[in-house]
Image (tube, grey):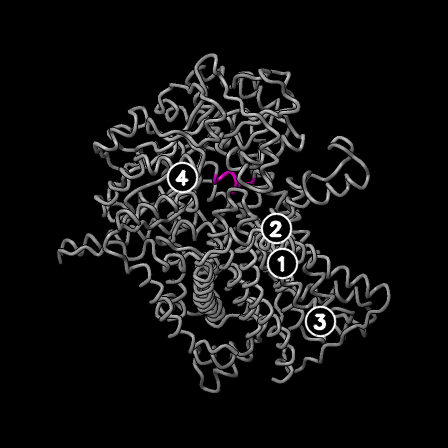
């Protein structure tokens, strides 16, 4: 790793504003994590021995199977589709290029519900098959059980693969064509060049996408609960809510953090010696392969399938219910809920991106072990199930509020009450802590591709670090920043458990509105709100996807 | 390109306005942390506001509210906790976040077995945990008790939600109270081996499974029957089953409660007590009965016509505190028998 400060003595480092601000951010987002560890290590009643001797091995193995399945399927769909739409020409490519992002706007619990509705015994598909073949009961034929591990893997991969697609595609677009042309000139087939050049070069971005998928898988509750797959997260909620043991829940959360840390280090380790910089000004225009006939058909099918299964079918079913249950689902508060969701998500994306840029850039400037560790640590919030994170936030916030209140009562005789707890600030804080890993990771991988000679040139022209960031890096990595903003925005729109617990009185977002019905298997009545979450989510998907495509032309101009 | 610098002031304005929404509060109000969905209780709260002019503010979540209350401590804005299941009421009492209260109205309306120690909680409704039996495949009288569910003749014919759901936990806790730990464990294992599928879904989903022929018997709360009848799609599920009130020959059917507690911090204590009184009075009790198909706790308020049509039944007289006492052990038995696997 190239560093600018590896010889900086320690005392000097503490005067470096970038190091100080990175530390501050790490402390801030670290508070909830520390609070959870605190709960885990000082439980009121230690339930660990009971868990370890009964259910824990099962939780761990089903978590591993689920992560492996979702990871593999997402990689296959995400990387494959990203390569096809970036490097090949086939009918429908222009539409698929952005349509492949659409499933991202569908919350996993919604798609799980929709497919259960379609594929279960009483559902449309089996009903149709029975009518067609004259079967009369479930004993006459075999049909895959949707509420199963396989079902959960498929559902989650269908809405999570866009992480991989998004990151990989941005990386393919940023890749210099000269490497690929060289490989072709040396006699490799397009497939060989893909495997030997494009994939390894894009590996940091693919790894970021994959780790996001795996972390989402790890902390998903809605889908696994619905499909009765007993993962660590399901076990955690069980211990907390049904056994009333928050300490035990925090212990499982800590175990999950170990999973995540292992994951991160495996990813780092796999590319420890790899370092490449590309000089953008030498990039050739993208040279796309024209596919025809069967090959074009296969490419079209490969890219269209995830869009149809992950977006078109769920949206059609939701629209059907939204139409038929319109009277019971339309309420006058609807616009208000949508406004809340939208505003919270916009503000949270801005703060998350700003902090992400700061973290990634301080890491670039100051690539020592401590900074590395601080940046890694700031990302751990993503690995925690939302409701646990919410409790982790309540603990320090309420302690702060009560301490301030005590002080004011003592010295001024007035009560300040709760300043932070139960405000939208707490929700925005939660979103920021939760999704900082998304923004920092993706910005870091974009920044890693900017050659240090650009920093050096800028510095020797008299610009300081801050001005270099604004004048050189931010314009160059604009695509990466927009990608990160998009991911965070959509994630915030869908976020449910933390919002539920932290929100102020009478405060609803679209997601909480959907939940109050969906939690009672009355999704028909909340289909309208679910549909709106999806639709609001796709506006920025389309807008930003266009900006990402345009980075290619932008890069050519520089 | 997005101008990041220009976005900062405008986002500050938005943050400010969002914060001020939450700060500006009417003079007369009462704040409720609710584990129950707003759409179930909103009509009753609306009615309260109409009669008294007191606004009811609600935060609904199915988890974490007790933790929030605990941490917010003496400054918590919450006045009341509204929840279902004796286990959760017991939890807020143990967490030391609620206070006792008594009023003549509450004492008159709510029978003493439905009052928490020193008035730390009050039950508002009761609900029976019944057996749903297929109309087609289970003859009347073929199953009459919870103990029957362990009978090998039902192998592969029973459906239920997770054994760790509070409703099932309370049922298992009542079994422990009556039969002891060892006998309950072997009963639970036997029920487990009779299950048609791994425990999944909610109570309605089990009735649906009977309709689809996946199983013949299911355990569920009886108000769901009424709710399913109200729904276009789900009424067909309800029509496929009979309601069996178990153990009518001996101790009676297991019942659980929904209830309310006054928090320790309660900044609007007076209004909160008014709301508690209101919820126990005939008007609100009748609304619970009619809209949610639960049993009102106030004597003299009749269940809805539909609920009455299922007939009167004998309910288990076991004190609720005994159910609360065995709750944790019940969950451990679920783990030990691998009931949910």
Q: Is residue B98 above or below residue B308?
A: below
Q: Is residue A260 above or below residue A438?
A: above
Discs 4 and 3 carry the same chain letter: yes
First in sequence: mark 4 or mark 3? Answer: 3
Left or right: residue A443 compared with residue A289: left
Residue A244 position within the rendered picture, expressed as x and y whole percent measured from the top left: 40, 35
Residue A5 position within the rendered picture, expressed as x and y whole percent measured from the top left: 46, 71
Query: For residue A450, what is the image quadrant?
Result: bottom right
Quickly name the residue at label 3. Answer: A94
Which subunit holds the residue at mark 1? A
Q: Is residue B1 above or below residue B142?
A: below
> Helix or strand or loop: what does disc 2 sit on?
helix
> Helix or strand or loop: what does disc 1 sit on?
helix
In the rendered image, residue A232 lying in the magenta stretch gets the answer yes
Quickly name the residue at label 2. Answer: A111
Which residue appears at 38% of the width and 34% of the height?
B258
Q: Nearer the viewer, mark 4 or mark 2?
A: 2
Residue A175 position within the rendered picture, expressed as x and y whole percent measured from the top left: 67, 72
Q: Are marks 1 and 2 in contact (CB under 8 Å)?
A: yes
Left or right: residue A556 compared with residue A404: right
Which residue appears at 46% of the width and 62% of the height?
A335
First in sequence: mark 2 or mark 3? Answer: 3
Which residue appears at 52% of the width and 67% of the height?
A485
Discs 2 and 3 carry the same chain letter: yes
Circle 1 crowding by C-alpha within 10 Å: few under 14, some 14–19, many from 20? many
Q: CA distance from mark 1 to mark 2?
A: 9 Å
Residue range (magenta): A231-237
First in sequence: mark 1 or mark 3? Answer: 3
């Amino acid at each position: 790793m190239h560093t600018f400060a590896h010889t900086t003595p320690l005392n000097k480092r503490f005067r470096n504003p970038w190091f100080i601000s990175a530390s501050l951010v790490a402390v801030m987002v670290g508070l909830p994590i520390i609070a959870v560890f605190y709960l885990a290590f000082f439980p009121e009643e230690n339930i660990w021995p009971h868990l370890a001797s009964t259910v824990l091995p099962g939780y761990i193995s089903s978590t591993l199977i689920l992560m492996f399945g979702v990871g593999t399927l997402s990689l296959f769909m995400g990387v494959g589709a990203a390569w096809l739409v970036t490097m090949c020409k086939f009918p429908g490519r222009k539409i698929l290029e952005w349509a492949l992002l659409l499933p991202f706007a569908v919350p996993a619990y919604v798609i799980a519900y929709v497919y259960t509705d379609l594929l279960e015994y009483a559902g449309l598909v089996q009903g149709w098959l029975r009518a067609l073949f004259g079967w009369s009961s479930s004993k006459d034929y075999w049909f895959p059980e949707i509420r199963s591990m396989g079902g959960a893997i498929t559902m989650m991969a269908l809405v999570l693969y866009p992480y991989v697609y998004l990151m990989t595609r941005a990386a393919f677009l940023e890749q210099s064509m000269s490497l690929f042309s060289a490989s072709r000139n040396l006699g490799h087939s397009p497939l060989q060049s893909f495997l030997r050049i494009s994939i390894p070069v894009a590996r940091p971005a693919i790894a970021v996408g994959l780790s996001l998928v795996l972390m989402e898988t790890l902390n998903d509750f809605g889908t696994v609960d619905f499909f009765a797959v007993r993962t660590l997260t399901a076990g955690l909620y069980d211990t907390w809510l049904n056994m009333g043991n928050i300490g035990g829940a925090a212990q499982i959360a800590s175990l999950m953090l170990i999973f995540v840390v292992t994951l991160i280090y495996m990813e780092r380790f796999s590319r420890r010696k790899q370092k490449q910089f590309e000089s953008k000004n030498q990039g050739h225009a993208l040279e796309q392969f024209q596919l025809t006939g069967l090959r074009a058909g296969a490419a079209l099918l490969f890219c269209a399938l995830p869009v149809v299964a992950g977006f078109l079918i769920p949206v059609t079913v939701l629209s059907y219910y939204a139409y038929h249950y319109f009277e019971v689902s339309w309420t006058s508060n609807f616009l208000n809920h949508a406004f809340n969701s939208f505003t919270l998500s916009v503000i949270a994306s801005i703060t998350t991106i700003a902090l992400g840029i700061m973290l990634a850039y301080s890491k670039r400037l100051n690539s020592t072990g401590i900074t590395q560790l601080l940046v890694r640590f700031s990302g751990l919030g993503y690995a925690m199930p939302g409701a646990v994170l919410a409790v982790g936030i309540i603990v320090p916030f309420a302690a702060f509020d009560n301490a301030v209140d005590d002080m004011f009562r003592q010295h001024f005789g007035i009560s300040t009450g709760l300043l932070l707890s139960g405000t939208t600030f707490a929700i925005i804080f939660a979103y920021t802590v939760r999704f900082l890993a998304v923004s920092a990771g993706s910005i870091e991988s974009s920044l890693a591709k900017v050659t240090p000679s650009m920093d050096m040139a800028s510095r020797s022209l008299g610009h300081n670090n801050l001005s270099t960031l604004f004048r050189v890096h931010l314009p160059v990595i604009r695509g990466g920043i927009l990608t990160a903003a998009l991911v965070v925005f959509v994630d915030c729109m869908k976020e449910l458990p933390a919002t539920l617990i932290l929100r102020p009185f009478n405060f609803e977002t679209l997601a909480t509105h959907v939940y109050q019905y969906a939690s009672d298997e009355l999704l028909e009545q909340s289909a309208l709100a679910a549909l709106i979450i999806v639709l609001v989510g796709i506006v920025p998907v389309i807008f930003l996807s266009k900006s990402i495509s345009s980075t290619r032309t932008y890069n050519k101009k520089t | 390109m997005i101008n990041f610098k220009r976005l900062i002031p405008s986002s500050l304005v938005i943050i400010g306005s969002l914060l001020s929404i939450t700060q500006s509060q009417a003079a007369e109000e009462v704040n409720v942390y609710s584990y129950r969905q707003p759409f179930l209780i909103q009509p009753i709260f609306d009615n309260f506001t109409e009669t008294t002019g007191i606004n009811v503010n609600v935060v609904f979540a199915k988890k974490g509210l007790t933790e929030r209350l605990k941490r917010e401590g003496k400054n918590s804005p919450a006045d009341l906790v509204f929840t279902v299941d004796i286990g959760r009421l017991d939890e807020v009492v143990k967490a030391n976040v609620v206070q006792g209260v008594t009023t003549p109205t509450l004492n008159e309306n709510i029978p003493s077995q439905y009052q928490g120690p020193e008035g730390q909680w009050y039950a508002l409704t009761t609900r029976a945990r019944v057996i749903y039996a297929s109309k087609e495949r289970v003859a009347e009288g073929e199953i009459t008790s919870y103990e029957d569910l362990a009978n090998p003749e039902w192998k592969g014919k029973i459906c239920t939600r997770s054994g760790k759901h509070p409703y099932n936990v309370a049922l298992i806790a009542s079994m422990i109270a009556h039969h002891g730990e060892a006998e309950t464990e072997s009963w639970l294992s036997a029920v487990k081996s009779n299950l048609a599928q791994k425990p999944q879904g909610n109570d309605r989903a089990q009735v649906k499974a009977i309709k689809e022929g996946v199983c013949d018997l299911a355990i569920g709360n009886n108000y769901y029957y009424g709710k399913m009848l109200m729904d276009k799609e789900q009424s067909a599920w309800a029509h496929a089953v009979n309601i069996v009130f178990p153990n009518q020959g001996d101790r009676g059917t297991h019942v659980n409660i929904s209830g309310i507690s006054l928090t320790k911090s309660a900044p609007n204590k007076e209004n909160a007590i008014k709301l508690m009184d209101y919820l126990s009075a005939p008007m609100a009790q009748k609304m619970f009965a009619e809209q949610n198909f639960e049993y009102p706790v106030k004597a003299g308020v009749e269940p809805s016509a539909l609920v009455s049509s299922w007939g009167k039944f004998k309910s288990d007289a076991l004190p609720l505190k005994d159910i609360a006492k065995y709750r944790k052990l019940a969950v451990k038995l679920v783990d030990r028998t691998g009931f949910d696997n």
